[in-house]
Image: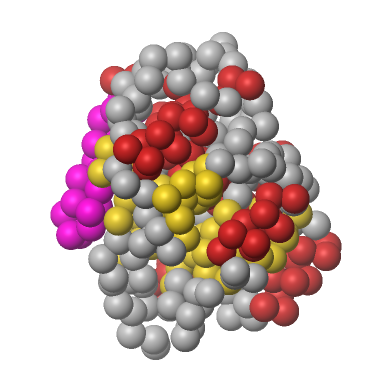
Amino acid sequence: MTTRTSTPRHYLMCKPTFFEVSYEINPWMDVTRETSAELAVQQWEVLHQTFLDWGHTVELIDPIPGLPDMVYAANGATVVDGLVYSAKFRYPERAAEGPAYEKWFADHGYVTQTAEEVNEGEGDILMVGDVILGGSGFRTDPASHGELARLTGREVLTLELVNPHYYHLDTALTVLDSDPAHPLIAYYPPAFSPASLALLEERYPDAIIATDADAGHLGLNAVSDGRRIVVAPGALHFAEALRARGFEPHPVDTSELLKGGGGAKCCTLEIRR
């Protein structure tokens, strides 16, 4: 069994003070279903405290009234080698989030690049070692992958999503180990087009394959520090598979936030300096 090592992480999060489901832009959202901002905050605080207990650095961006999805911080930008590539949202309901996150980074001394192409940050852009995986099909325009490759000088692989329940890449794929020496991912095959699935199978033959039940609990919307992994409590098969590979799964309930279509990873934007 591979010995897993936790590495210090730097995250940006946003408290769900104004969380509600007031519109529907993904299949998880239902405006007729009651939501509780109080419960969302309670669950978010457990997630936030978990990262602090693990010794990670967590910074906070102030929530803005009228932007209930701002809690899904991962969608707000992508940070590679200290460069901040801003989000440019597909739907007008979330359009103001991109500039809000970009301003936070600029105010904190980061070099920012305002995106010309539609992209939804780490929702669709994930780093695996030296490679960037870029999701497309529902929210992010593949042209943004080329823009990001030019900005970072890194290889960007485009992966097409075909199931609307897995509308962002981070709902269908998890980066478990981002060390370039031994990168490892987990993913849910039915979320991808045949060509993209073939690419994943070729590039990551040792990947963990998620079950229907794992994916149905949004279990792949997980956060790994290389050893410890925050997972959805209902993703039982996934947790077993992680333990078999030497990881330590830590269930954290984000079920209230799932009503908006997001889980632990959606709430966690990684800052890579």
Question: So how many labels did they put on this image?
Answer: 0
Residue 176 percent across, percent down from the top left: 45, 68
- Viewer-closest of 135 and 108: 108
Query: Is the stretch drawn in magenta largely helix, strand or loop?
Result: helix
Write the residue at 37% across / 42% down: 105
> With 69 as the anchor, is 165 left or right in this view?
right
Q: Give the magenta-colored segment's residue range.
A: 39-58
269 to 247, vertically: above or below:
above
Q: Is residue 47 magenta?
A: yes
Residue drawn where x is 46% and y is 20% of the image: 67
Q: Say which quadrant the C terminus sits in.
A: bottom left
- Quadrant location of residue 261? top right
Quadrant holding the N terminus: bottom left
Rendering coords of residue 82 (x, y %): 40, 59
Q: Residue at x 16, y 54 (%)?
A: 53
Position of 65 relative to 15 (above/below): above
Q: Is residue 92 magenta?
A: no
Question: x%, y% of residue 187?
Answer: 60, 62
